[in-house]
Structure formats: C-alpha cells, structure tokens
Image: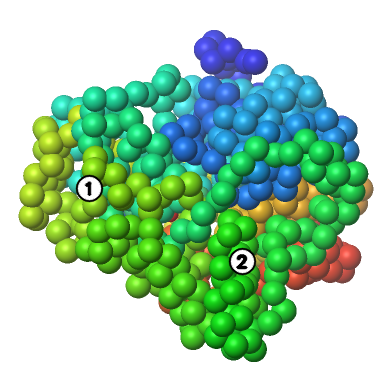
C-alpha cells in the first residue's frame, strides 16, 4: 500500500494510468500487467472495492445472485471462493474483492486515498497528464477510466442541510465505523434500491423511522437464503458453461427469459407465471414474458400483479395506496429486490410521507420541514441515488486534444463510440462507459468484456506500432444514434429514471446505456475489432 503523503513531487511516468480500483480497475490492472505494461491505479477510497467499498449502509446487498456476481477470468479463483448466501451482502463482496487484490498481488500498484482531479491530454507529447488531490502528477500515454457508473453520489441541495444538528448520511458514502440508530428518530429520503434495502433494517433499530417517498417503486422479494454447499459445488462443476451461457443473454445474467408474449397465454396462465416468479424471487420477474419491456399493455399486466401484492402485504389501505407505483412501466426504472420492504410499513414505528404532495421545503436544525408538517429527527439518511454513468467522469476535469473539455463535449448528453472511447480524447478508454450496456447487465460481465476488449486493443496498438488511437467522429455519431434508436423501441425512454438522466436537475434527457442486449453488443465489438478496429483512427 502506498503512503498517502510525501509522494515524489516529480511526475510519475508509467505506461498506463487506471482511475478507480473497483471491479473494473482491479481487473484492468491485472490484464495490463499480463501485457507487460507498467500501470498505476489511483483510488479515492482508503481500500479497494469502489461501489462496494463505499456502500456500507444497513441492508446493502447485490441484486444479482452470488454465483453470477463474480469474476470469471480465473478458474482457480472461481473454484476456490465460497459464497455463503443466494445474494451476496456488501461485506461479503468486499471480502471477495480484497481477496482478489491480494491473490493477484494488485495492491503494490494502487495508490489509495488519492482522488484524481484532472486528466489533461498533451497532444505534442502524446501523454495524459493526470493530477490528484495530493498535488501529485502522473504521466502516461494511455489513461483508463474505471470510475464506475454509480459512484458519484447525488445529495439534493435542500436549503438548511448545513444547519441540521443531528447526523446525516448518504448511502453511497457510508461511514466505516458502525452506526447505531437505536433510540433515534430517523428519516430515509428516497425509495430506490438503496432506500428499499436500508429501510427494513433501520426500522428494526430506530425508535421511529419516517420514509420520505417521492416516487413509489416496484420491488420483488429476494427470498435471500444461505447457499447450499452441495448446490454450489454442483454449479462449479460447469462454471465456465454457466458463464458462457450468461454472456449470450441480453443482460449477462442467467434468468429464465421467456419466449412467450404476455398475451400468448390465458389470463390465468399469466397470473400463474407471475406468481411462480414472485415465489422464486429476484429480477427474473420482469422476464416472465418477452414483451414486458416493449409493450405497455404487457407491462401493465406485470405492474397490476405487483400492485395487488403490495395491497395484500400492507395492512393500512391508505399507506398501501401511497406505495403503489403508477408513474412508470415496471423495469424501466431499475427494479428493486427487497427483504421485507413492504412489510416494514406494517410496523408501528414507521411513517410514510409522500413528498410529491407535500414537498420537502427545508432541513431545519431539528429535522425536516415539508409543506405540511415538521418532523423532528436525530439522523437523516439520503438514499437519493447517483449522477449515474456520466457523473464520476464529469467531476474530473478531463481535457482532450486541443484542450476540449469532456464536460463541454457532453453538455447535451454523452457521446461515445461503443461506450469505450469518445472522439477527441485519444488513448482515453472508458470501462462500461455511457453508450455501453453497463448497468443494464450484470456489471461484472460487462466489466470483464470491456477490460478484455481494451487490453486486446492496446496489444494491437503495440503490435502495429501505433501511439495514438481515437474514435472517429462519424462512427461515434452513428453509435449515438443507434443507442437512442434501440432505446426508443422500448418503454425505457418513457420513464423519468437515472437511465435517462432525469434524476439530476439540468442533466440532458438522453438514454445513457445501450439497451440493445449484451450479447448483440459484444458481437458488434468483436466485429469492429475483426474489421481492423473499424471506426477508430490510429496514428504512429
Ligand atoms: P435511485 O434508484 O436513483 O433512487 C433514489 C431515490 O431517491 C428515488 O426514490 C428518488 O426519487 C429519490 N430522490 C432523489 N432526489 C430526491 C429529492 N430531491 N427528494 C426526494 N426524493 C428524492 O438510487 P439508489 O441508490 O436507490 O439505487 C441506485 C442503483 O444502485 C440501483 O438501481 C442499483 O443498480 C444499485 P425519484 O424516483 O427520482 O422520484
């Protein structure tokens, strides 16, 4: 582990700079070493793990099953690691990432507690000059942004937050010491995946929990449970086959993808199918029929089923009504997977406040004031999400050829070729960047694909003697159109989701990831490479 202080004042010269030591940065570092390159990785956290380092809120858990949410690049690694539950907790994922960092001896090239503040391309020297919050600089011909799609926390600017005399937290930046809410009056603002996971756990501790909900959300039960060691061993016998099958799906996850439309079956069969999937748990639910993401009537059937479930779980009909999602098609905002979320509203110590009808006006020294009432609080938890996909990149001062700022280039929305490069920013690679399937998939599957593709591309550059690679503007324009075109054929673009940038004031409303399917996307990437990296411009 490098010391955070007293780093050399002269710029460090390496072959590649990697920004971020989460799942993407760690694997990138490993692949670069295999190419014989000297890379350095900067990481803002005091440990590796990225998202899973920061998101330590109560109940934090992945909504992709453990046997799938892990690296596949090492047969030894996937065989030796034992998962303990169907869905992995944050703590278990972090133990796994720490194990990976040690097992592949990655730490010696990672500088922790070092936030990258700027990355500026020096055209004459063909060099990325990267600055950090320590005032240090590193220079490298190649820079790789492994900064994460959900890593730039969004804390709404409610007036008066600074005056609040209690404690406040963001789920995406949770303290590392244990936080005990016993005996406290607590608020959770936000009912996305993070809020829905945290709310049941906080309600168990707090004297009183008030949930401030702007948009009710669809959630299906996780039915999390311990993993049977025999089943795990059985799965591992053909781990690579499972992985390969997953890579050939649209989300990189082995769900049961139905080949039937919702109206190909009788109403009774339809409900039976939803019931079967509800009983099985998880996001598999939205794949009950193959038209749920494209046909509003089919989607409505799934929505109605979930609304009926909410009504049957929540005892107070008024509260149940407040919890019913109506404003978006199921799955077009990330579907939540919960443990006892709706049941929590049956507790005497939990109150639900609808901030669409009674908006939060201010945070006061003693609590939260809405247009209708004042709530006295000891702690406030912001489960208010992220400036997704572009936020982490745009918080860095990135300047490409001719000094163009990425923030300016992306002012009307991000533009990339394949989500992996953006024209005018030579030798700058993005891992699971906007315009790639990224968070619409099992993100580790996407990360492994991107890292592998970038590593092969760098190997190609070296083999051919190229020192400069850039996306061609016409290829980028065509890809940006394709990203929007495939999205417009789905229901996704009709929702005010973070996929659309709609959760951040002033963010352009464009669909950010590529929704055309992971398996189709990877074929396109492969074809581009086989065609001599068609759509990229090389120079030596
Ligand atoms: P999300 O899914 O963006 O959820 C954030 C929640 O916070 C959502 O309910 C928002 O309501 C709410 N929110 C945001 N700003 C405000 C304000 N100003 N007032 C009231 N409520 C607000 O983030 P998560 O962290 O839960 O999940 C992110 C992803 O991480 C998740 O999808 C998984 O992939 C893992 P809104 O819906 O915008 O009305």
Q: Secondary structure at mark 2?
A: helix
Left or right: residue 272 versus residue 427 is: left
Q: Mark 2 = which residue? A: 276
Image coords of residue 489 (percent x, y): 57, 82
Front in this rendered view, residue 439 or 30: 439
Left or right: residue 471 versus residue 366 is: right
Could you tell me which residue is drawn at 22 percent across and 63 percent down? Answer: 318
Q: Quadrant of residue 422?
A: bottom right
Could you tell me which residue is drawn at 41 percent across and 26 percent down? Answer: 175
Could you tell me which residue is drawn at 54 percent across and 15 percent down? Answer: 4
Front in this rendered view, residue 373 or 498: 373
Image coords of residue 110 (percent x, y): 66, 25
Q: Mark 1 = which residue? A: 351
Circle nearer the viewer, 2 or 1 = 2
Image quadrant occupied by the N terminus: top right
Q: Secondary structure at mark 1?
A: strand
Front in this rendered view, residue 236 or 214: 236
């Amino acid at each position: 582990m490098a010391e955070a202080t007293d780093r050399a004042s002269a710029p460090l010269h390496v072959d590649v700079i990697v920004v971020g030591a989460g799942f993407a940065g760690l694997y990138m570092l490993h692949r670069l070493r295999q190419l014989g390159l000297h890379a350095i990785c900067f990481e803002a956290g005091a440990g590796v793990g990225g998202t899973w380092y920061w998101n330590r809120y109560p109940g934090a858990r992945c909504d992709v099953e453990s046997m799938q949410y892990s690296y596949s690049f090492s047969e030894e690694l996937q065989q030796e690691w034992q998962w303990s539950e169907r869905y992995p907790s944050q703590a278990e994922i972090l133990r796994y990432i720490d194990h990976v960092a040690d097992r592949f001896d990655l730490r010696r090239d990672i500088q922790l507690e070092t936030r990258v503040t700027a990355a500026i391309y020096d055209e004459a020297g063909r060099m990325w000059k990267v600055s950090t919050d320590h005032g240090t600089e590193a220079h490298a011909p190649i820079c790789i942004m492994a900064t994460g799609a959900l890593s730039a926390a969004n804390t709404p600017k409610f007036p008066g937050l600074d005056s609040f005399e209690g404690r406040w937290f963001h789920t995406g930046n949770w303290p590392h010491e244990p936080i005990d809410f016993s005996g406290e009056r607590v608020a959770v603002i936000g009912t996305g995946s993070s809020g829905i996971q945290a709310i049941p756990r906080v309600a168990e501790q707090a004297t009183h929990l008030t949930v401030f909900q702007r948009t009710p959300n669809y959630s299906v039960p996780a039915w999390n449970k311990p993993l049977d060691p025999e089943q795990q061993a059985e799965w591992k016998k053909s781990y690579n086959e499972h992985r390969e099958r997953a890579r050939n799906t649209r989300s990189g996850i082995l769900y049961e993808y139905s080949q039937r439309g919702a109206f190909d079956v009788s109403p009774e069969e339809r409900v039976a199918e939803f019931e079967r999937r509800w009983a099985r748990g998880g996001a598999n639910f939205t794949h009950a029929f193959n038209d749920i993401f494209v046909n509003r009537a089919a989607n409505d059937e799934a929505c109605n089923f979930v609304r009926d479930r909410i009504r049957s779980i929540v005892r107070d009909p008024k509260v149940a009504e407040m919890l019913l999602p109506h404003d978006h098609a199921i799955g077009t905002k990330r579907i939540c997977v919960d443990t006892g979320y709706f049941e929590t509203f049956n507790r005497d110590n939990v109150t639900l406040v609808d901030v669409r009808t009674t908006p939060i006006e201010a945070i006061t020294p003693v609590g939260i004031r809405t247009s209708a009432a004042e709530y006295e609080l000891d702690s406030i938890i912001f489960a208010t999400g992220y400036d997704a996909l572009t936020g982490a990149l745009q918080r860095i001062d990135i300047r490409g050829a001719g000094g163009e700022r990425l923030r300016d280039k992306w002012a009307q929305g991000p533009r990339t070729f394949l989500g992996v490069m953006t024209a005018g920013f030579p030798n700058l690679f993005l891992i699971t960047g906007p315009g790639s399937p990224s968070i619409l998939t099992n993100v580790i599957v996407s990360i492994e694909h991107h890292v592998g593709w970038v590593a092969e591309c760098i190997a190609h550059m070296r083999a051919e003697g190229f020192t400069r690679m850039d996306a061609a503007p016409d290829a980028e324009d065509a890809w940006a159109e394709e990203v929007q075109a495939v999205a417009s054929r789905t229901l996704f673009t009709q929702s005010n989701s973070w996929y659309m940038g709609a959760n951040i004031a002033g963010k352009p409303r464009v669909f950010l990831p590529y929704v055309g399917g992971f398996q189709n996307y990877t074929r396109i990437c492969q074809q581009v490479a086989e065609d001599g990296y068609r759509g990229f411009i090389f120079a030596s």
